[in-house]
Image (cartoon, rainbow, N blue to C red):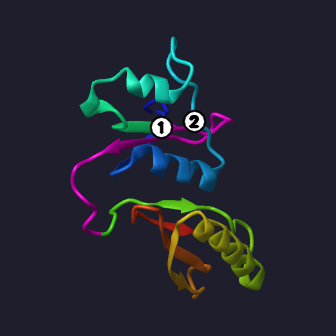
């Protein structure tokens, strides 16, 4: 049996810090302190060659349980559906109207942060309801 590995989830995006700060708000994640010798991330960024400034940003679960999220600048725009996406688990253990109310409340909060509601997938015989959304750069995720 293999050992348990830590996982980092990487997002390709146009504006790494902006997208990272959005996901901090969604998940309650935090930005780590800047590297030693720098008082702020802005100061660190200014120390980099111009082509590297703002090229990446990261955030993590303050409890250390969830995966680190890493955001890297890429030159191309997003053009197709994600093959992997995050499920933000806000309705765990809830069913029916109670679950839907929790999903809708979180959807409203995230839309105010710049997310886009795509569609409600209503409950069926196999699955509870979820809401498909997009982050501020169009990456799909689900409120589950």
Disc 1 residue crowd, few under 14, some 14–19, many 20+, Cα 10 Å: many
Q: Earlier in the sequence, mark 2 or mark 1?
A: 2
Instruction: Please say if the residues under marks 2 and 1 sit with CB atoms less than 8 Å apart.
Output: yes
Q: Residue at x 46, y 33 (%)?
A: 5
Residue 10: quadrant of the picture: top left
Q: Residue at x 46, y 62 (%)?
A: 136
Above or below, 54 relative to 26: above
> Which quarter of the rendered picture does the C terminus lie within?
bottom right
Residue 78: quadrant of the picture: bottom left
Q: Residue at x 56, y 76 (%)?
A: 131
Q: Is residue 4 visible?
A: yes
* Disc ID at residue 31: 2
| Position of residue 76 measured from the top left corner of the image (x, y, whole percent) | 21, 55
Does the magenta-highlighted stretch encompass residue 61?
yes
Secondary structure of the residue carrying tag 2 is loop
> Which quarter of the rendered picture does the N terminus lie within?
top left
Choose between 4 and 68: the one closer to the eye: 68
| Position of residue 58 measured from the top left corner of the image (x, y, whole percent) | 47, 37
Q: Is 15 displayed left or right of 76 in the figure?
A: right
- Secondary structure mainly formed by the magenta segment: loop
* Disc ID at residue 16: none
Choose between 115 and 70: the one closer to the eye: 115
Residue underneath mark 1: 58
| Position of residue 33 measured from the top left corner of the image (x, y, whole percent) | 58, 25
Disc 2 residue crowd, few under 14, some 14–19, many 20+, Cα 10 Å: some
Choose between 62 and 16: the one closer to the eye: 16
Q: Is residue 144 visible?
A: no
The range drawn in magenta is 58-80
Does the magenta-highlighted stretch encompass residue 65?
yes
Secondary structure of the residue carrying tag 1 is strand
Above or below, 122 relative to 105: below
Q: Is 20 displayed left or right of 113 in the figure?
A: left
């Amino acid at each position: 049996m293999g050992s348990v590995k830590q996982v980092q989830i990487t997002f390709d995006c146009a504006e790494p810090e902006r997208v990272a700060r959005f996901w901090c708000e969604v998940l309650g994640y935090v930005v780590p302190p800047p590297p030693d010798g720098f008082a702020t991330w802005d100061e660190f960024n200014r120390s980099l060659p111009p082509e590297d400034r703002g090229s990446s940003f990261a955030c993590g679960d303050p409890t250390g349980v969830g995966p680190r999220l890493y955001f890297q600048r890429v030159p191309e725009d997003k053009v197709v559906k994600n093959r992997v996406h995050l499920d933000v688990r806000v309705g765990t253990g809830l069913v029916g109207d109670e679950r839907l109310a929790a999903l809708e409340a979180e959807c409203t909060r995230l839309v105010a942060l710049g997310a886009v509601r795509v569609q409600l997938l209503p409950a069926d015989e196999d699955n509870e309801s979820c809401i498909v959304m997009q982050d501020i750069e169009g990456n799909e995720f689900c409120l589950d």
